[in-house]
Image (cartoon, rainbow, N blue to C red):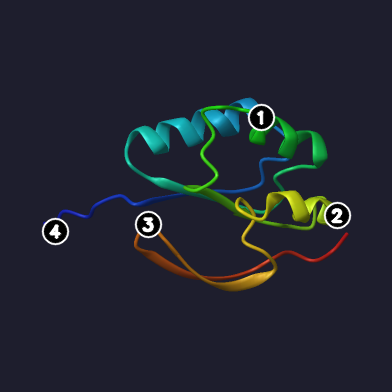
């Protein structure tokens, strides 16, 4: 059986539940994985809490916006938010992504 190295943990629809999200992120990071949150992370207070957490590394924990995110906040999330669409290499995992619809 082939040994597959874990490189990326995918997380979806956090909806503002910062504490469980950070626990998942910490566990992944401790195992050498990056994380990708697939939209619906939350609104301004969530971003502020994450960016204020000294253990949250925006260089290896990324997200793209879903329809339950605050699009006006992207300006201060540039190193954390991947934007509207694109190709990205996250710790050796190559992905194409498209953000959710505006709501």
Which SS class for mark 3? loop
Residue where numbered disc 4 is placed: 2
Residue where numbered disc 2 is placed: 72
Q: Disc number at residue 10?
A: none
Q: Is residue 37 visible?
A: no
Residue where numbered disc 3 is placed: 91
Which SS class for mark 2? helix
Residue pictured at 47% horizontal, 47% vertical: 60
Mark 1 crowd level (few <14, some 14–19, many ≥20, 10 Å Cα):
few
CB-based contact (under 8 Å), mark 2 and mark 1: no
Of the two numbered discs 4 and 1 in the rendering, the one whose residue sits closer to the viewer: 1
Q: Is residue 47 visible?
A: yes
| Picture quadrant where residue 4 is located | bottom left
- Residue 81: x and y in percent read 64, 55
Residue where numbered disc 1 is placed: 52
Q: CA distance from mark 3 to mark 4?
A: 20 Å
Q: Which of pointers 1 and 3 lies earlier in the amino acid sequence?
A: 1
Mark 2 crowd level (few <14, some 14–19, many ≥20, 10 Å Cα):
few
Q: CA distance from mark 1 to mark 3?
A: 24 Å
């Amino acid at each position: 059986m082939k040994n597959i190295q874990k490189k990326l943990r995918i997380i979806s629809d956090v909806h503002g539940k910062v504490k469980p999200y950070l626990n998942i992120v910490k566990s992944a990071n401790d195992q050498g994985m990056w994380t990708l949150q697939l939209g619906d992370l939350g609104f301004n207070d969530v971003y502020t809490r994450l960016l204020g957490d000294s253990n949250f590394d925006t260089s290896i924990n990324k997200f793209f916006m879903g329809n339950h995110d605050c699009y006006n906040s992207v300006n201060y999330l540039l190193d954390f938010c991947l934007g509207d669409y694109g190709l990205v290499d996250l710790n050796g995992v190559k992905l194409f992504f498209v953000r959710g619809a505006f709501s």
